[in-house]
Amino acid sequence: MKSNIKKIMIMTMVLMLIISSFNITVADSSKPVLGVVADGTLQVVKAGTPSEFKVNIKNAGYMVAQNVRVTIQGDHPFRSDIANLSQRISTINPNDAKELIFKVTTSPTAESKTYEFTVLIEYSSYDDMSYTTTEKVYVQVDNGNVEPILGVYSYDTGQSALEANTPDSLVLNIKNSGGVLAKDVTVVASGFSNEGVVLYKDVDTKNFAELGTKSTQMVYFNIMAGKDAKAGTFPITINISYIDEAGKKYTKSSIAYVTMAGKGAVDANLEISDVVFPKSVKASQDFEVTFKVTNKGNVDIATADVSYEYPENFISKATSRVVVKDLAPGASKMITFKLMAKAETVTENYHSYIKVAYVPKDAATAEPETIQEYVGLYVEGGADDASSKPKLIVDNYSYGDEYVYAGQDFQLTLNIKNTSSSEGTKNIKVTLTSEDNVFTPVDSSSSFFIPSVGPGQVYTHTISLKTKIDANVKIYTLTAKMEYEDGKGNAYDANKTPYSESEVLSIAVAQPVRLETAELIVPMEIYQGQPFYVEQSFYNMGKSIMYNMIVKLEGVETNEGSYFVGNFDAGKSEYFSAQVFANEVGTFDGKLIYTFEDALGNVSTHEEPFTYTVSEMATYEENNGGQMPNPEMPVEESKGMPIWQIIVAAVVVLAIIAFIIRKVLKARKLKKEMEDLDE
C-alpha cells in the first residue's frame, strides 16, 4: 500500500512539472520581450554641457532578440542636431540586460525640471518577426545658465564733439553679459536727423554671426553732423536683435549720446525735401523718384549738380544727372528720375541715394559742398525671383586698416550672405583672384570651402594674405568668385544658369617710405665773424615717391634756411647746403628737419640735430704772450708769417673753396633738372 502511494505521488509531481512546462512555453517562449529596467535613480544632466544618458534594456522573454534599435523620442531636453539619439545592439539573450550609453548635449536653454519622454525599442526574433514597444524614461535638468543678454557696453566718437562737414565714426562696443551664446546678431541705429546726426556713406544696419558669453564685438557707423545741428547732446537709438542656440528671439534697446559742436550762420544751404517714390516696385516695370531741391541759404547757388546713385540691379530710363544753375535764396526746383528694376532683380530692399554737390555764387573756392538723401527701394521680383532662388553676396569685408603695406601679411575677413529668404545654399567654393596677382594666400590655397549658408544667414571667413613686395601704391581689386548649389543640391537654376556670383573688392596698398641721410657736415673750427656751411646728403631708400619734401635749417643765422625738393623719387639722392653766419661767440644748437608725404598723404618728419662752437678770432697780443713790443728796442725782421695770419688765411681759403663747391653743386643740380624737363 505504501509503495503504491509513493508511486502515485511521484507520478503526480512529474505530471505537474509537465503541465507547468507546457504553460510557460505557450505563454512566453514564442517571442522575445524587451523593456527598460529602472534602477530607481533619477539621472541628472546640466544644461548646455555634454553628458551621458544611460538606458538599461532587458530581455524578459525566452527567445533571443536580434537587430535591436533603441531611439530617444518625445519631449526630451537633448540637442538632436549634434548628437546621435539612436543606437543598435546585435542581440540580447533571454533574461539578459545590456546598458546603452548615449553621448548627449543638453540644450543650454532647457528648463530646470524633470523631463518625461519615451524610448522606442525595435527588434526581431530568429524567425524574422518584428516587434516594437515604447517605454517611459525620466531625466532631471539642472540649468544654471541665463539667457544671452546683449547691450551697448560702451561707445565713442573720434571727435569729442561732432563738427559740421567733418565725417566721424560712432563706435559701439556690444557685449554679451549673459550665460549662453547669441547668434544672428543684428544692430540697427536709428534717430538720425538733419538737426542732429546723419549717416555718412553708410547703412543703418550691421550684422555679425555670433557673440560668445562675456565677449564683445565692435560695430562702426560712419556719421556726420546734420546741416541744421546745434550745440548739445543728440541721442541715437541702438536696437539689437538676436537668437539663442535654440532659436528663441531676443530684442534689446540702448541709447548712444553724441555731442554736437554746432555751427554758426551759413551763407549757403541747400536742402532735399518732398521725396516721393513707390512703396514697392515690380521687376521690369518703370517707376519714378521725385523730389525738391530748395536754396535755404542767403546767397545764390551758382550750380547744383544733382545725381541719383542706384544699385546695379536697376537701370535709368532717362538721365540720372541734372545740373541746376542760378538758384536764388528761397527758390526750389522739382526733379524727377525715371528708373526700372531689371527682370532678374530679386525680392529685397535696395539702397539708393540722391546726391547734390553745389557751389555758392562768388564762392572763395570752387570746392563744392555736398548733401545726400537716402531712398530705400523695395522690389517685388518675378515668379523665379530670389525669395526662392538663392544668391550669395559679400555683405561686407575688412582688412584691418585703411591700407595694407607691400611685402606684409594682413587678415581679410569676408561676410558672405545668402540673400534668399527661403532657399539655402551648400557646397560653396569661394576662389580669390587679385589684380596683377598682388595678393597671395599665406599657408593656404586661394580657395576655401563653406558647407552651407542658410536663408538670410551670414557666414564669416578670415584668410591670411600677403601683399607683393614690389606692389605699386594704388587701390587693387580682389575678386571673390562663389560657386554653389541650392538647398536641393542643384548647381543650375531653371534657366540652366550655374549658381555662381562674383564680388569685386577694393584694397589700398601702400609702400613704406624710407629716408636715409649721410653724415652731417659742420666745420670743427669756427671763428667769430666768419661764415661756414652746414651740408648733408640724403637718399630715398624706399620703393615709393616722397611727395612735397622740404628741408629746413633751424636754430642758426642764415639766409638759406629751407630747400624745397618737391617729389623725391625712389632710389634718388639729393644734397642740402646752406651758409651760416657766426656773429656771436659760444656753443649753439641747430637741426635739419626733413618733412614729406607718402602716396596716401601721411606726413612724416625726420630731424638731424647738431652742435657747433664759435671761437674769438686770435689777436696780436695773444700771439706775443700778451706783451706789447718796446718801441726803443730794435724790431727783428720777421722770418715768416705769424701764426694768427696763417689761421686767418686758412679760414679765408676754406671759405672760398666751400663757396666754389656749393656753386658747382647748384649748377649740376640745375643742369639735371633742365635735362629732366627736356625728357
Image (cartoon, rainbow, N blue to C red):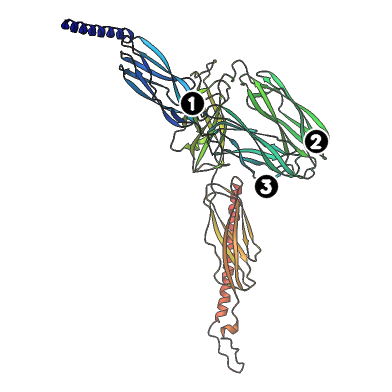
| Near-viewer residue (423 or 600) | 423
The kind of residue tagged 2 is Asn
If you read the primary sequence from the N terminus, does the residue marked by circle 3 or circle 2 appear first?
Answer: 3
Q: Is residue 368 left or right of residue 331?
A: left
**Residue drawn at x 42%, y 30% as measured from the top left:** 51
Label 2 Cα crowd, 10 Å radius (few <14 / some 14-19 / many 20+): many
**Mark 3 element type:** loop
Q: Amino acid at mark 3?
A: Ser
Q: CA distance from mark 3 to mark 1?
A: 55 Å
- For residue 531, the mark is none
Viewer-nearest of labels 1 and 2?
A: 1
Q: Position of residue 153 (x, y in %)?
A: 60, 41
Residue 433 visible to the viewer:
yes
Q: Position of residue 333 (x, y in %)?
A: 80, 30
Residue 248: % across, % down? 56, 27
Q: Which mark is residue 295?
A: 2
Residue 306: image x %, image y %? 73, 32
Kindly identify which numbered label has been placed on residue 160.
Answer: 3
Does residue 76 show up?
A: no
Q: Which residue is mark 1?
A: 114
Mark 1 nearby-residue class (10 Å; few <14, some 14–19, many ≥20): some
